[in-house]
């Protein structure tokens, strides 16, 4: 039996070695066993450096204009139950009176 590692992406046991690389024939994933482990989950911090998590409540620290509208999210607006996402605007949330929107973590502080 072979001592090759299972595919880290699909857990297939049918991997093979090509030089220094391992290859999965089922999902076509290629990896190097000696390479550094996969990148850690991205840590998103608020304006004060506190780590944010899904479900946290935050407070807006700056007046924010809502793009495509005349509405403004005022300083001190509390936002409950945030969801962290990848991208430039890394917080998805619902704000009372405005609705669903995305915020940048640099304009909020953890409540």
Image: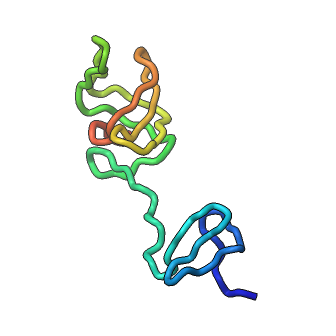
The image's colouring method is: rainbow
Instruction: Please state the total of marks drawn on the protein image.
Output: 0
* Residue name at image x 65 percent, y 75 percent: 15
Q: Position of residue 20 (x, y in %)?
A: 49, 83
Tell whether 57 sits left or right of 28: left
Q: Nearer the viewer, residue 4 or 80?
A: 4
Residue lying at the far right in this picture: please name it: 1
Residue closest to the far left? 62
Which residue extends farthest front? 18
Examine the image and state in which quarter residue 62 appears.
top left
Q: Nearer the viewer, residue 73 or 102?
A: 102
Q: Quadrant of the C terminus?
A: top left
**Frontmost residue, 45 versus 70:** 70
**Left or right placement of residue 76 versus residue 12 in this view:** left
Query: On screen, 69 above or below 37?
Result: above
Percent of width and height locating residue 3: 67, 87
User: Which corner quadrant holds the N terminus?
Assistant: bottom right
Viewer-closest of 63 and 14: 14
User: Residue 59 sits in which quadrant?
Assistant: top left
Residue 61 vs 30, above or below: the answer is above
Left or right: residue 25 versus residue 42 is: right
Question: What residue is rendered at 28% in x and 22% in y?
Answer: 74
State the residue at coordinates (35%, 37%): 89
The location of residue 11, given as percent across then percent down, is 68, 67
Name the residue rendered at 31%, 16% in the picture: 68
């Amino acid at each position: 039996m072979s001592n090759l590692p299972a595919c880290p992406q699909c857990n297939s046991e049918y991997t093979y070695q090509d030089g220094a690389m391992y290859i999965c024939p089922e999902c076509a994933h290629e990896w190097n066993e000696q390479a550094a482990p996969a990148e850690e989950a991205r840590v998103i911090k608020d304006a004060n450096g506190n780590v944010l998590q899904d479900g946290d409540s935050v407070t807006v620290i700056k007046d924010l204009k809502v793009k495509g509208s005349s509405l403004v999210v005022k300083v001190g607006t509390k936002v409950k139950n945030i969801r962290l996402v990848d991208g430039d605007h890394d917080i998805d949330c619902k704000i009372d009176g405005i609705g669903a929107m995305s915020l940048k973590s640099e304009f909020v502080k953890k409540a």
